[in-house]
Image (spheres, grey):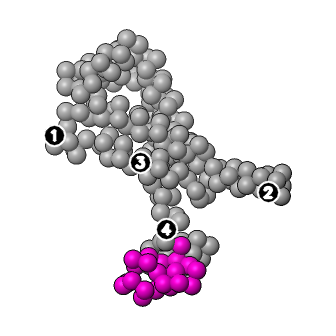
Amino acid sequence: MSLGAGRGGDGGPAVGGLGPAGGPPGAGAPGDGGLRATAARHALLPLRIFLGFTFVYAGLDKLTDDAFLSSSGPGSLAQMLEAVRETAGAAWMVDLALENPEGFGYAIATGELAVGLGTLAGLWTRLAALGGAVISLTFWLTVSWPSDPYYYGNDLPYLMAWTPLILAGAPLLSLDAVLATRRRRRGRHIFG
């Protein structure tokens, strides 16, 4: 679309190929029900569902695995930490976790569960996404660090996948959206 080929949201020409309300051409106004507008509003939902379910599953999997939460032995967090200690990008993190592997295992599992549930519900989504990013960064700097090439490790893509949710939150189909609507209504009622 060329400059002036479309119409802006105020009836004026679209600027720089942007459609109404500054969105992509054909996106329509924010309340418009066009296919592109609907897709744009729902764009983060699949990512939210995937990350939320994955982190809930990972947290529950760890909490229900007696071997993972034991202080030593096959399948334990302590055994895994010992195995990656020499190759970790942040060996100090591994050393810190090895001081109390059971407590660290419960912290990881509980954190993953909280992040996943917050993401699925869309409650404090930016904070939940930040927590997910921190967990993913920790795993990347410790467990996935020796992956060669780097993109074979899955924790770095998870870290990057949390970024859009940190930036945008969950503006649709979320408890955050419900709470924001209530705050706006109360504000109008109190000050209106």
Q: Amino acid at mark 3?
A: Thr
Instruction: Confirm or deny contact between disc 4 and disc 1 (CB under 8 A).
Output: no
Q: Nearer the viewer, residue 47 or 160?
A: 160
* Residue 163 numbered tag: 3
Location of residue 10 with respect to 85 vertically, above or below: below
Residue count near mark 2 (Cα–Cα under 10 Å), binned few <14, some 14–19, many ≥20? few
Mark 2 or mark 4, which is nearer the start of the sequence? 4
Left or right of 9: which side holds 158? left
* Residue 40 numbered tag: 4
Give the spatial CA distance, label 1 vs label 2.
56 Å
Mark 1 or mark 4, which is nearer the start of the sequence? 4
Residue 74 in view of the camera: no
Give the spatial CA distance, label 3 vs label 4.
17 Å
Residue count near mark 4 (Cα–Cα under 10 Å), binned few <14, some 14–19, many ≥20? some
The segment highlighted magenta reads: 1-21
Seen at 46% across and 17% down, the residue is 103
Q: Which residue is mark 2?
A: 188
Give the spatial CA distance, label 2 vs label 3.
33 Å
- When asked about the image quadrant of residue 134, the answer is top left
Report helix, strand or loop for mark 1: loop
Report helix, strand or loop for mark 3: helix
Q: Is residue 134 magenta?
A: no
Left or right of 41: which side holds 80? left
Instruction: Confirm or deny contact between disc 3 and disc 1 (CB under 8 A).
Output: no
Q: Amino acid at mark 2?
A: Arg
